[in-house]
Each structure stands twice: as C-alpha cells, then as structure tokens.
Image (cartoon, rainbow, N blue to C red):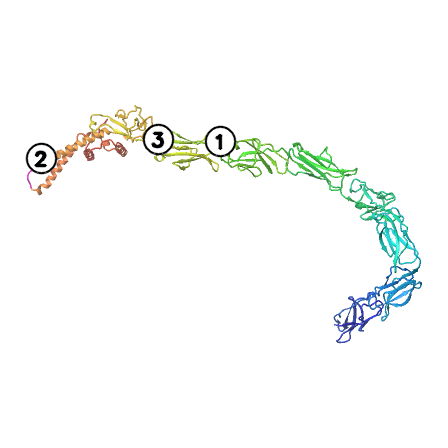
Amino acid sequence: MPAVTRSSNLGPMYPGENITFTCSVDVSSGWEYVWYHDGEEIHSSIKTTYNISAIAQSSKGDYYCKAKRMGKELFYTDASKTISLQVSDPPTPHMTRLTPWSDVFETETLEFSCDGVASGWTVTWFRDQKQLTKEGSPFSIPSVTGADEGMYACKAQIKSRGLVSAESNTNHIQVYANKPKSKLTRGSNFDPMYPGERITFTCSVNVSSGWEYVWYHEGAEIHSSSRNTYNTSAIDHYSRGDYYCKAKRMGKQLFTTTQSDAMTIHVSDLPIPTLKLLSPWSEVFKNEDLGFSCEVSSPEWTFTWFRDQTTLQNDSQVIVNSKGSLLNITSVTQSHHGRYTCRAELKSRGVISGLSNTTDITVHANMPTPKLRRNLDFVPMYVGETMTFTCSVDVSSDWSYQWYKDNNELLLSGASSSFTLAASDKGSYSCKASRGQKTSTVQSNKIQLDVKEIPVPVLHNATQWLDVFPTERVELSCGMTGSSGWIFTWFRNKNLIKANSSVLIENDGTKLSITAASTSHRGNYSCSGALKGRSVNSKLSKEVMLDIYDTKPRVTLVQNPDDSLMHTADSVSFHCHINVSSGWSYLWYKNDSPFKAGHHYNISSAGLADTGSYKCQVKRGASFQSDKSEAAKLTIEERPEAAIILLTRWADVFSTDSLLLKCNVKDSTLSWNYTWFKENEQVDLPLSEEHKVTPQDDPDQSRYTCKGTRNERPFYSVTSDSYRTKNLLLKRRILLAISGCIFFGIIAVFIGCIALRIFRKPASDFEKTEDDNLFIRAQVKDFTDSPCPLVEYIKDADLNPSPKEGEENDAISSETTLMPKPSPEDQAVTTNSHESTENGGGMMSFQH
C-alpha cells in the first residue's frame, strides 16, 4: 500500500499558497502514480509528487494515491491513507471603535480594536490609507488633536508566509470644538400610519460625530444608540404619540446636545378585507355563475385576487373591475375549482393588508344523486309513529326539494318532511333536488315504507287453570303474534303491576309468575306492549280473570253404595269429589298407603283384601295439593252360601213318587227369601225355602239351584251347587231291593251250610273234599242262577249311566252335604246287582 505525504503541515492553508504531495511505494519499481481528490481521479504521472501551485477553496478535501503498472494486465496497489487539506479564506479584520463616537472634540481619547484575527497574524493600522507605525490591537490615541482627524482602518498579515488580509472596515474621525443642537426628522409623513408599517426617525447633530443618541417617546427614554436613526420596526398602537431625541457622548465628562423638536405619530389599525361570496353556494356545477366581492372601509385601497395562492388575471370568464373589488366568473369549469381570497394594498405606500377570509369553491363535473334517508329504519312502522324523511345532496347547498310517493309528486317542500303515520302512508318514497334555472338532479333512491296497525298482545295462561288456591303458582304469558322486540307491561284491574317478592316479571315482561297466590292477586289481568327504543304502545290485551279462593279446596270422598259392611262379589265405587277449579290429579290411599287411580276408583267384585280405610287427595302443578279427605271405612265379609238339602227320607221311597228339596243359607241367622232355578232359569214359584220335584213337573229330571235373597245386606247369597234329580227315587228303590236280596241270600246260604253240616254222611275228609266243593259250587250256582224278583225291574241303562251322569251324580253327592250316605249293605246290593247283570241275568227297568 503506497504512503502519501505533504510538503507543508500548516493548517489551514490559505488561497494562493502552494503545497506538494508525495506518493511512495517501498517495493518494486516501474510504478505510475494516480492521484485522487475526494474520491475522483485528478492526476496520473510517473512522478511521485503532485503539486498545487495556487491553492483555492476548491482544493480543500481528502487526497490519496494509488500506484499502478502494466504487465500482461493492469495492476493497482491498494489506496494510500487519506490526507485532508483544509483551505480557509484569509481573515477580514473588523475594526471596532472602542470610543463611542467618530466625531470628537480635541483632548478626547480615541481608541480602536481590530478583531477577527487568528493567532500568528500581526495587526497594522492605517489613517487615510497610510500605515501608522503602531502595530497590534487595541490602538489608542490618548489626546485627540486636529491632526488625528481622518479615515482609520486596519489589516492583518503573516510576514513569514507573505500573507496580507483584506482591509478592515473604515472609521472616519472628525474633530469638532462647538456644542451642536439635535435635529429630528422622520422618513414618512403619512398620516395615519398603519400597524406593520415602519417609520425611521433621524436624530442629527451638525457638528462632530460619535454621538450616542437617546430617543424619547411621550417623555420617556425608549432607546439609546450610537446610530442617529431609530427604526420603529413594526408600528402598533403603542407607537402613537410624541417623539424627540438628544445626542450625548462620554469623554472625561458627559456631553449632551440640545433636545430636538418633537414629532407626533398617529396609528390606525390595518384594515382586513372581507371576501363575500355573492353567489348562494360554494359548491357549483358546470355552467353555473360565481360572484365575489372584496371590501375595506377606506376607498383608496385596491385589491388583488388569488385562487390557491395564485394571482388571478382577467380573461373571458374571469372579470375583475377597475379597483379589483368585484370578481365575477361566468359559466364555471373544473379550472375554477379552488380556494379564493383577496388582499388590499396602498400602492403609494407599499402597505399590503393581510389576506381576507377564504372561500373554497368546488366545481363538480357530474350532477349529484340525492340521498333519501329516514330517521327510523324499523320494518314495519306502526300507526301513530312519527316518521321523518330527509332528502340530502352531499355536495353544495341551497337546494330545493320535490317529494314523490309511488312516483306521484307530493305537496311537500324542504329538505325534510315529518308526519305522524297512518295506514294510508304505506308506499314507496323518493325525492329530487334542484336550484336556479339550470340545475336539477336525478331522482333519489326509493324507500319502501310499510305501515301497520299496532298489534294487540295476546294473553295466555301458562298454567291450565285460572281459579287457584292460596300458595299455588300461577303463570301468565303475554306476546305478540309474528312480531318481536316488545316489552310488556302488566295490569290487574287496569292498575299497573310492579314486580315484588311474590310477583315475578321476566323476559321483557313476556312472562308473569305469581309464586305463591293469595287473595290480593285476584282480579282481571291484562297486558300491553311497547317496542324497545320506539314510541309504539299497544292497546291492552283481552282481560283474563284470575280467581283466588280464600282457602284450600275441600275434598269429599263419595262411596257408592255407602254401606260400611259389604260382601264378597259386591261392587263398590269411590268418587273423589272436588267442586272447584280443574286440572286436578288424584292421589288415593288405602290404610294410608298410596295407590294409583283416577277420578274414580271402582271395585267391580269385592274381595276380603278390599277391606280397609280409604282416603283421597287432589294435586296439581308441581307442589300444590289439598288436604286428605275424610276416611271411608269399608269392611268386606264372605257372602253367605246357599245349599240344597233333600228332605225325602229313605223310608219314604216306596210310599211316594216325588222329591222334596230345601234351600238353606249356611251358618246364617238372618231372615231369607229363596229363589229356585231349574237349569239356570228362575222357577216361577213363591219365594219358599222348599221345592217339590215330581215326575210330572220335571219329566227331564233337570238340575236345580237356589239362592237366598233379602231386602238388606247381604241382598243375596252365593248360589248353591246344582242338584240333579235324575232317577233318584228309582235308584234308591233299586239300592234297597238289591240290599234286601243280598241280605236274604246270605241268610239262605248260612242256613244251607248249617243244614249240610247237620245232614251230610260221614266220609273221609280227603275223599269228600272235592265232592263237598262241587256241592257248594253247585248250590251257589243254583242260588245265583235264580233271579231276584226286584232286579227284573231295573234296566241296564239305569244301572250303567253315562259318564256325564256319573259325574253329575257324584257332584250331587258331594254338594248335598245333608243327604245320608248309603250303608255298606246298600253298596253291596248295588255291586251284586251289577255283577248279576253282567253275568247275563235279565233285568227289567222300572218305567215312570
């Protein structure tokens, strides 16, 4: 990397001086050196030095170098470090008169200083361009004489570098001997002056110089300066009044001139022009006209017009009158769009007012479309509401409006129209705007207005009943069919109901709940609706009468029949009776144990298990229930049972051809009447306990039953078991006959055996055994071969009844508990007779 050096390290350098830079590369040779100033190449040479013979301000900046050489390709070293060259202009000394005046009197002291000189510079002094012998600053003349009068100046120099600065400012020194009088003059004689204007007062002294001037306003010192002029800067109302001046200067003693004559200044406010738009609108459309005026209170002013801070000039469309107070624009175009203002000025004095107020003019290329709005956007609207339509044009002003309903013009005017709605106001509304003779908009958007009659709320009872008892819960609902957003108010007997601990009004009044009814809640309930956020109030709904009973209901348990003692198979019904309100569910108790039943509880056929104490209770809703009814006690006993007794005795079977039956109620001491039934049909006989059956009356030999009846409970007994009379007398006769034959047969055998024992011949037992057995068998055979006379009258059919008849007779035997059982002898006769029949014995039946 090359190294760069400079021939002079003085800093800064001054224009006209020279400097040499050297670029060196420690290695190799054959280099060409390239010099750069502030990054731009300025010189290229094989020399290692670069010289600036006369430095100028453009020479300042950063310098560096590179070395390059050409082989097969160009090769550059890295850039050297930069060296900064600072160039400054030689200082221009400023001479200051340290004494306050330039005109002096003899013997006064005069002193100067030369400032603005850097270190290393030497100050030299000149009077009338002649160098004085004294060097350095400050420069003092202790006692001025007439010879010291002249023009003084100073310079700075560096002798070693041959540098000399420019000459300082000069100061002329005049030496006087007489005391002068001050004279006051003003730079402008306009009256009045305006705030913002400037006025310069000059206080002059004819002799000498170096005075310090003191200015007075209304007798008070306002300014003191070595200059003989006083500039008021910008006049304001405080600047009005009398002005005068004096001059003074301090030597060994204070010296003051005579006071000048006074001058009076009048100050008035600067007028502000007023811009007026003579046209009625600031937003205009093509081809409309505009007019402006600019005014101040004084007539000598002229006016200048501006649009968007650009001065306007007259042309074919912009017309300004001679003084500029009127501006007219005919047939405006888009180019006339902008902010307009004006300004007044007094050209002779250079007084310019401030800008007037501004007016913004907007020129629209397209005609606007009015926008129709409504203050209420509810659908539907209701009769009686106040609706306001507003027709607006978003641009410009001073529009006239025309109104339409269903495309028919209405006799309405103005930008808005309010009216109380009626059903006939339903329809489609629109509007149009116009102004002047040229401008008219298209029709606005359309708004469909739907007007309906205010609906009447419907009141429902949410609970099923409207006559309730103390502590019951009641719920009523109020609603609008097909409409929402309503808040409902409740009334009882036309009086407003407010929510409290027992009356809850919920869900915007749609539900009224009485948590625990009392007589104070009795009355006619109604409700009315009001739409949220709207002045819509409905009429009262139809009234619903809510009746509150004074006490809980009394429940009566009615038993039918009302007998406390009843018998099995009786029917009994219980009716839980409550004669008030409705919607009840019924609770039943037997011996205080609950069971399920409805309004009635019927026992169609009582049993012993139905004995008990019955109560009922009514309930409705979630928690209300009555007290239990009084108990109905029911006792069920077994119904007495009737039985048929055969009164015809065995001894009478051969002396009669009829049977006598008796009906008896078992284990009963009550007085009974008896009813007889033959084949389940009542026998038309007197209600007697006995009934005679004869072959003539009952040739079919039917089944008979009976039951007891009475006029008190029990009204009837259990019907007896059936009793069949088929061949009963005949069968008894046969049994007795067979029994007799068997008996006499046994006697005969017994006697025969005795006789054989007595009359037989002796023989050996072995030999006679078989013969005896044969004889016995023969005898028995002979005996059995002889038919019994009674058996001949019995038919086979009578002794061998059908299985059904056998079953019936068995039933008769079992049912007739009082009928005597046949003796063993009778059974034996029956058995033998049956066996004889089976062995071929011919028997004849007795025919009735």
What main secondary structure does the magenta stretch of the protein show?
Answer: loop
Image quadrant in which you'd find residue 363:
top right
Up-down: is 205 above or below 597? Answer: below
Q: Is residue 267 above or below residue 142?
A: above
The residue lying furthest to the left in this view is 762
- Counting other residues with Cα less than 10 Å from the Cα at mark 2, is it few (<14), some (14-19), or many (20 or more)? few
> CA gap, disc 2 to disc 3?
75 Å
Q: Quadrant of the N terminus?
A: bottom right
Query: Can residue 791 be seen by looking at this rendering?
Result: no
How far across and down, in percent of the image, does residue 451 sit?
Answer: 65, 34
Q: Nearer the N terminus, badge 1 or badge 3?
A: 1
Residue type marked 3: Leu
Q: Secondary structure at mark 1?
A: loop
> Looking at the rendered structure, which numbered label has been put on residue 565?
3
Residue furthest top in the image = 686
Q: Position of residue 26 (x, y in %)?
A: 75, 75
In the image shown, does 681 or 550 lie closer to the viewer?
550
> Which-is-in-front pick, marks 2 and 3?
3
Q: Which mark is residue 550?
A: 1
Of marks 1 and 2, which one's residue comes earlier in the chain?
1
Residue 670 placed where, x, y %?
A: 30, 28
Horizontal relation, residue 547 to residue 710: left or right: right
727 horizontally vs 42: left or right: left
Comparing labels 1 and 3, the label whose residue is closer to the camera: 1
Q: Report which quarter residue 247 is drawn in.
A: bottom right
In front of the other: 803 or 563:
563
| Foreground label between 1 and 2 | 1
Give the class, few, some or many, for how many residues have Cα within 10 Å of label 1's Cα (few <14, many ≥20). few
- Magenta span: 759-763
Q: Which residue is mark 2?
A: 755
